[in-house]
Image (cartoon, rainbow, N blue to C red):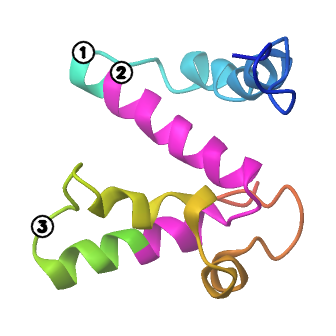
């Protein structure tokens, strides 16, 4: 809560601006025709925006994360393992390795 922690913004302007990015896409790619597809889209947009807000390249992050899952043979469990994969918990070495090459880098360059 922002009253107890001065680092937390009183408003949610940043979150609302981040949500505006995928909204035009819904019309461009005809939306989601299944509930699971909408949930997957929301999760992916959340991952991409979290990476961008932490200066992490979404493409590098997803490549690294999925490679680690393949090596392990399973996705990380929610009991502690997932914390290692959250961009705000990265070590300085991981931040350097997965950082965006330039600010505002997109996961897929515009054509």
- Magenta span: 38-64
For label 2, the residue is: 38
**Residue 15 visible in the current orientation:** yes
For label 1, the residue is: 35
Looking at marks 3 and 1 on the same chain, the residue that comes earlier in the sequence is marked by 1
Q: CA distance from mark 2 to mark 3?
A: 23 Å
Tell me if residue 106 is in the magenta stretch.
no
Q: Where in the figure is residue 59, as x and y percent of width and height? A: 57, 67
Q: Where in the figure is residue 5, as x and y percent of width and height? A: 78, 26
Which disc is residue 96 wearing?
A: none
Q: Nearer the viewer, residue 75 or 77?
A: 77
Q: Is residue 48 left or right of residue 80?
A: right
Residue drawn at the location 54% of the way across and 36% of the way down: 46
Element at label 2: helix
Q: Nearer the viewer, mark 2 or mark 3?
A: 3
Q: Where in the figure is residue 104, as x and y percent of width and height? A: 85, 55
Q: Residues within 10 Å of mark 2 (few under 14, many from 20)?
A: some
Above or below for 65 versus 3: below
**Callouts 1 and 2 close, C-beta under 8 Å:** yes
Quarter of the image where one finds residue 60: bottom right
Tell me if residue 46 is in the magenta stretch.
yes
Dominant secondary structure of the residues highlighted in magenta in the image: helix
Residue drawn at the location 69% of the way across and 16% of the way down: 1
Q: Is residue 10 left or right of residue 52?
A: right
């Amino acid at each position: 809560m922002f009253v107890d922690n001065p680092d937390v913004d009183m408003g949610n302007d940043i979150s609302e601006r981040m949500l505006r990015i995928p909204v035009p896409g819904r019309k461009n790619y005809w939306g989601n025709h299944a509930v699971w597809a909408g949930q997957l889209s929301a999760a992916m947009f959340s991952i991409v925006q979290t990476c961008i807000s932490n200066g992490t390249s979404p493409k590098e992050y997803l490549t690294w994360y999925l490679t680690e899952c393949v090596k392990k043979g399973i996705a990380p469990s929610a009991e502690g393992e997932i914390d290692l994969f959250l961009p705000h918990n990265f070590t300085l070495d991981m931040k350097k390795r997965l950082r965006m090459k330039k600010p505002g880098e997109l996961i897929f360059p515009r054509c």
